[in-house]
Amino acid sequence: MDKVKTRYGDLTPYSGASDYRKKYRTAVDCYSSGQLRSIYLEDPEVLDYPAGSFQTELITFYEDGSVKRVFPLYGQISAYWSIEEEALTAPYYDFDINGETIHVRPQCLYFYPSGKLRAVTIWPCDEIEVPTPAGAIRTKLGFELYESGALRSIEPVFKTVIHTPEGDIRPYRYRPIMMHAENAALKFDEEGNILKSD
């Protein structure tokens, strides 16, 4: 298939050739306007985005052509290829949160239309500790940021207790509404105050 021109480079879509880990999906998808919606790449490659350089196998776009989501890997999980095997080859990246650096291997990176990072979703087999205004919190889902870089929301692990002047809270969503890290159970405003606990 011919290369597709984007603001992040000329990209080669998946050809559809048989591969035990490739997903069966449309290699190139477009909005009804004809603007590019997503490209599933032939091979993962490192692309340069406003928020940094990230390995990319699937990239989705806003209708204006700016990056929306990046999946460093996007293989088909099956009896022949486990999520643990897929995650083993996933790259790690460093992110600055609340003045601290955390080392994470993202399953998905979500961006604002401005190009700034909005959320990082981690692999289901991972668990990370994230510095928050309420202290270090462990999560198995990931974290969401404001465009300013301040922490916006996080999904704490089960039995996490947050101490507040109004009393203890135990934010946890038994089933996250979505598989992505945004709009998680524990939310903060940009000054670090707890906004809402589901």
Image (tube, grey):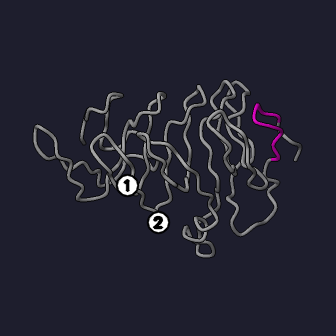
- Span colored in magenta: 5-12
Q: Could you tell whether 110 is left or right of 3 in the image?
A: left
Identified at 55% across, 70% down, the residue is: 84
The percent coordinates of residue 151 (x first, y second) are: 39, 37
Under mark 2, the amino acid is Cys
At 25% from the left edge and 35% from the top edge, which residue is drawn?
194
Q: Return the x and y of residue 75 as percentages of the image width and height.
A: 65, 61
Q: Circle 2 sits on which residue?
A: 125
Residue sitting at x 55%, y 53%: 106
Task: Determine the residue located farthest toward the right in the rendered image.
Answer: 2
Three-letter residue code for mark 1: Thr
Image mark for residue 82 = none
Residue 101 is situated, as x and y percent measured from the top left of the image, at 48, 48
Residue 8 belongs to magenta span: yes
Earlier in the chain: of badge 2 and badge 1, it is: 2
Q: Report which quarter residue 111 is drawn in.
A: top right
Per the rendering, the mark at residue 139 is 1
Q: Position of residue 165 (x, y in %)?
A: 12, 38
Which secondary structure dominates the residues rendered in magenta?
strand
**Residue found 35% across the figure and 56% down from its top:** 138
Helix, strand or loop for disc 1: strand
2 and 1 marks in contact (CB < 8 Å): no
How packed mark 2 is, by other alpha carbons closer than 10 Å (few <14, some 14-19, many 20 or more), is few
Q: Which secondary structure, mark 2?
A: loop
Measured along the vertical axis of the image, is residue 28 above or below residue 15?
above
User: Does 21 appear above or below 32?
Assistant: below
Q: Nearer the viewer, residue 166 or 122?
A: 166
Total marks placed: 2
Residue 191 located left or right of residue 57: left
Toward the front, the furthest residue is 99
> Magenta span has 179?
no
Quarter of the view holding residue 81: bottom right
